[in-house]
Amino acid sequence: MELKVEKINQDNLASQNSGSTTITTGPNSTLIPVVNVEVEERGFLIKVLIEKSCSGLLVFILEAFEELDLDVVHARVSCSLNFHLEAVVIITDNKRSSDKDAQRVEQAMFRAIQSWGEVNPLE
């Protein structure tokens, strides 16, 4: 388990420049999510795209927002043929956002997707 978490962390770090990584969701299944986090003055524009329908993933992402003390200002989500999320979020304590904060948000999105995949393995 520790090796799996370490590999995920390494993949997340490697993907910071590309905005995507491979997430293992079952014995023979993988997802290749594309996560893009853009810094705005007091928050972020977050885009997540996965080429599969991911029922229940939104709950994991919203929990990640809550853990990071982010408030959703505007969001569009589609979960029918694929999973697509665009959300504008702001930092609850009104501080300015930074590139370092954007990296934390991106890593949190990948962790949320990984956690979802562990509970909902794809067939």
Image (cartoon, grey):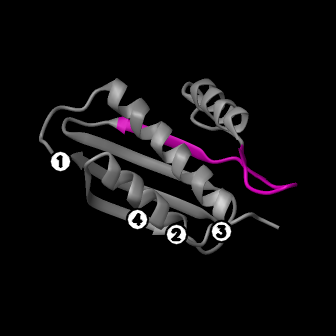
**105 relative position to 9: left or right:** left
Q: Pointer 1: what residue? A: 92
Q: Are marks 4 and 2 in contact (CB under 8 Å)?
A: yes
Disc 4 vs disc 1: which is toward the camera?
1
Q: Pointer 4: what residue? A: 76
Disc 3 vs disc 2: which is toward the camera?
3
Q: Are marks 4 and 3 in contact (CB under 8 Å)?
A: no
Location of residue 12 in the rendering, given as x and y in whole percent from the top left corner:
59, 32
Q: Pointer 3: what residue? A: 53
Disc 1 vs disc 2: which is toward the camera?
1
Which of the marked residues, 4 or 3, is nearer the chain's N terminus?
Answer: 3
The span picked out in magenta is 23-38
Secondary structure found at label 3: loop
**99 relative position to 95: left or right:** right
Q: Quadrant of residue 123?
A: bottom right
* Near-viewer residue (6 or 32): 6
Secondary structure found at label 1: loop
Question: Amino acid under label 3?
Answer: Ser
Spatial CA span between label 3 and label 1: 30 Å
Secondary structure found at label 2: strand
Residue 34 drawn in magenta: yes
Location of residue 33 in the rendering, given as x and y in whole percent from the top left corner:
63, 48
